[in-house]
Image (cartoon, rainbow, N blue to C red):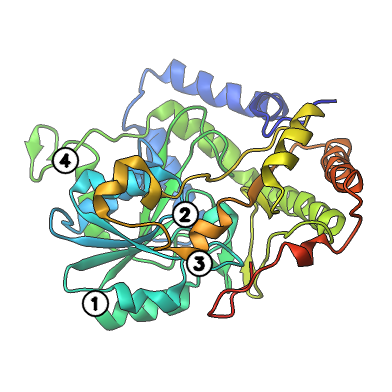
Amino acid sequence: MNVPFGNMQVHYQAYKAQIDEAVARVLASGYYILGPELDKFEAEFAQFVGAKYVVGCASGTEAIYLALAAEDIGPGDEVLVVAHTAVPTISAISMTGATPVFVDIKASTYVMRETELESKITARTKMIVPVHIYGHMAEMEAIMKIAAKHKIKVMEDVAQATGATYRGAVAGSIGDYGAFSFYPSKNLGAFGDGGAVSTNSEEKFKKLKMLRNYGQSKRYYHDTLGINSRLDEIQCAILSAQLPYVHQWNEQRRQIAARYTEGLKDLVVTPVEVSGFKHVYHLYVIQTPDRDELQAYLLERGVQCLIHYPIPAHRQQAYQFLGYGEGSLPTTEHIVNRILSLPMFPEMTSEQVDQVIDGIKAFYAERGVTEGHVQTATSVFADGQTV
């Protein structure tokens, strides 16, 4: 039996009736852009997030861009962000002309190390972008305190953490903005590209709506510079049809994660869920010094694993002009050679989960290791962080 990394076909078949009905409704309406389905989804998603307002847009990348643009961030400004993220996070900053300034990550949860933030702040710092990577939120209380002290805005990158919580607050409801991606594989995915920005500011809500539609306050009246970044009616209808199931899917992800952790905790470094946080496991990421050999071994046995992400943004060729040399972000650079993402999607069967666990156990058994390997895979940084 093959175990794919994800399976959108299985997902579609499980919710085919709801999705087909949503698409048919929009097609029959003859209204395909900026219509009632968008209004409906924005209201529903705002309630889900616990934010006052949501503005739908064309992608997660443009969600980040629009929030930056709403703050008039551009050339000469700096945005604090992690390098351990999907490059689209950084691409959105580059789109404004601002400069990304990289902050290292926590070794346990892979999120922004908030204790490093203040040392990176300058007079040009205009926004902090904590990335809720893999489904675990960043330490938002500390980040918000630092931001308030220095009068800096905060945008949560929630692309991988829809439905995650921090001390009861839902991801995207704490910062000045939340940026969401609805790429198909996300915890709430469209059947194409899509994104959204959440905010509690009525003023910024109105500006975001203009920015996504050529800067128009009303048709053919352009009050500011803007772009075309509209979430179309079909995607809105599909998202609305799926939204009631997100909490259920997140719980299924958490159950799969719990089984992975129980089966693998003595062999590899398994994910951490900090007290007060709810991890929604967009990805289940392990660490092992045998990463490449393990990935190849599992693939030979029908188990597809991926690496998120093999090259951090500051080491990408496109961002060499920023001048970050090797060793500039030690935790980030250490973990990227060890991380491996296991198959994770809500429709995974028990047999598929068992096959992944058994494959990893077999890999180590062939090497004479049955337990305790996680200790040999451990290293401690000078600040006491453990990888």
Taking the spot 59% from the left edge, 38% from the top edge, the residue there is: 242
How far is mark 3 from mark 4, CA to CA?
30 Å
For label 4, the residue is 226
Could you say which disc has been placed on residue 151 in the image?
Answer: 1
| Chain-order first, disc 2 or disc 1 | 2
Does residue 29 sit above or below 175 in this rendering?
Answer: above
Could you say which disc has been placed on residue 84 in the image?
Answer: 2
* Secondary structure category for the residue under label 4: loop
Could you say which disc has been placed on residue 138 in the image?
Answer: 3
Determine whether, in the image, residue 370 is placed left or right of residue 108: right
The reply to whether dot 2 and dot 3 touch (C-beta < 8 Å) is no
| Chain-order first, disc 2 or disc 3 | 2
Q: Amino acid at mark 2?
A: His
Taking the spot 41% from the left edge, 55% from the top edge, the residue there is: 83
Q: Nearer the viewer, mark 2 or mark 3?
A: 2
Determine whether, in the image, residue 365 is placed left or right of residue 119: right
* Secondary structure category for the residue under label 2: loop
